[in-house]
Amino acid sequence: MKNVLLWLAFGACVCLVLLCLVFSSIRNNESAKTAPPDPQSSAQHGNSQSDTSPVTVPVPGPKAVRHYHATVTVGITVILWSFLSPALFLFTGWSARIRSWAERQQQNWYFTFVHYVLAFGTLYFLVNLPLNYYAGFVFPHNFDLTNQTFSRWLGNTFKGAALVMAIGLAVGWIPFLIIKKSPRRWWLWLGLLVPLFLCVQNYIQPVLIDPLFHQFRPLPDKTLEAKILAEAARAGINGSRVYQVNMSLDTRLDNAYVAGLSGTRRIVFWDTMLKDFNDDQLLFILGHEMGHYVLHHIIKLVAFASLLAFLSFYAWYWLAGPVIRRCQHRWGFDTLSDFAALPVMILAFQLSVFADRPAYMAFSRHVEHEADRFGLELTHNNHAAATAFVKMVQKGVFVYQLAPIIQFWYGSHPTPAERIEFCNQYHPWESGQPSRYQEYIQQ
């Protein structure tokens, strides 16, 4: 137990050091030798098809810097609590007591699992609720990034918890059964199941899960829709499905994304983005999302995540047994197949995600960069692309350059400054050079 506590203390110290590094490195953003944005630029007004001038990376304002500091602080707090909350259930013996209670309620193995999950899940939700409330409701309101009502936040929070509980009851018993039946090879069987689970999740997400929280409908602007369909045809995507979602109920930020697999694949614009961006900027953003579609980025990300999960399961296999044996008297169980070991699985998952994140984020940055390239090659509108990034950063009160350690560990995209500079510099068609993805694009 002492060793485990020492490791938790070490993790807390590491997070505090990272926090200090981030706060010191933000000075690079504040002292960057870049000009402020031109308020008359096409980032704020009109279309930008005829404008080919480079876009200067703006200086982050004081509010953006405060938001950055606060975001890092909240993020590190969430990371620490994601480790401490399952440890709380272990070292207090709560998990073992809940398991014993569940066994007294029902002798059947699966229904014992149901009782345990319902009780544990409810307590775990309540333990995490105060931090979730601050990070998900109070914090964005402090920076005027949302007009979400408390009742809607609470409704979505309970709805999300109920969804997690339902999924847990439907498939959460599978790891326990596999570990029980195959104590030496469970890491292999679970590793092989991960790609299937991720594919099913990606397939059903846009049609069964997302509509529980937001309304999706076709684009109401038929002129824009015609431009989008023409661009999709040039990218070789016929019969593409493009939707808008009413995210303005929950946020003032802007975003678009591609979701789904095979027959459920679609491109989605937040209604906030459709309101704030001009057609040229939207067509570049659409080109970026089409890049994900054409270049099969979703399935590549699923494959990479599956590989990392496979390696993580193997590490769990070697570490879980010794750790549980050392702490079995305090925790109240001696095997990973015991339902009371669920907090161990949660803690192992959180630690694995934290350890694997730099590799996954590096791969994510690569595919996002290539999607930017595809969007530029499809539209040839570098100025619209760069001003779109400026507008997203300004609307979200973000900074343009993250601290290196944050970008390394949590940067899923290139930094806004890097994306803007790439838009300024990448235009091989102007000098007659071949484009990387010209084979996918019909001229």
Image (cartoon, helix red, strand yellow):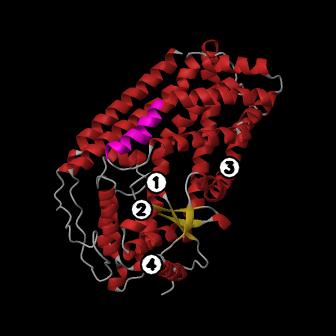
Task: Give the Cα separation between the discs numbered 1 and 3.
Answer: 30 Å
Specify which label sits upstream in the sequence, 4 or 2. 2
- Quadrant in which residue 185 is drawn: top right
- From the image, tell me which residue sits under label 1: 249
Specify which label sits upstream in the sequence, 4 or 3. 3
- From the image, tell me which residue sits under label 3: 197
Amino acid at the residue labelled 4:
Leu
Depicted 60 relative to depicted 439: above or below:
above
Mark 1 or mark 3: which is in front? 1
In this rendered view, identify the residue nearer to me: 168 or 309.
Answer: 168
User: Any mark on residue 272, and which?
Assistant: 2
Highlighted magenta segment, given as a residue range: 130-143
Mark 4 or mark 2: which is in front? 2
- From the image, tell me which residue sits under label 4: 378
Magenta includes 131? yes
Specify which label sits upstream in the sequence, 2 or 1. 1
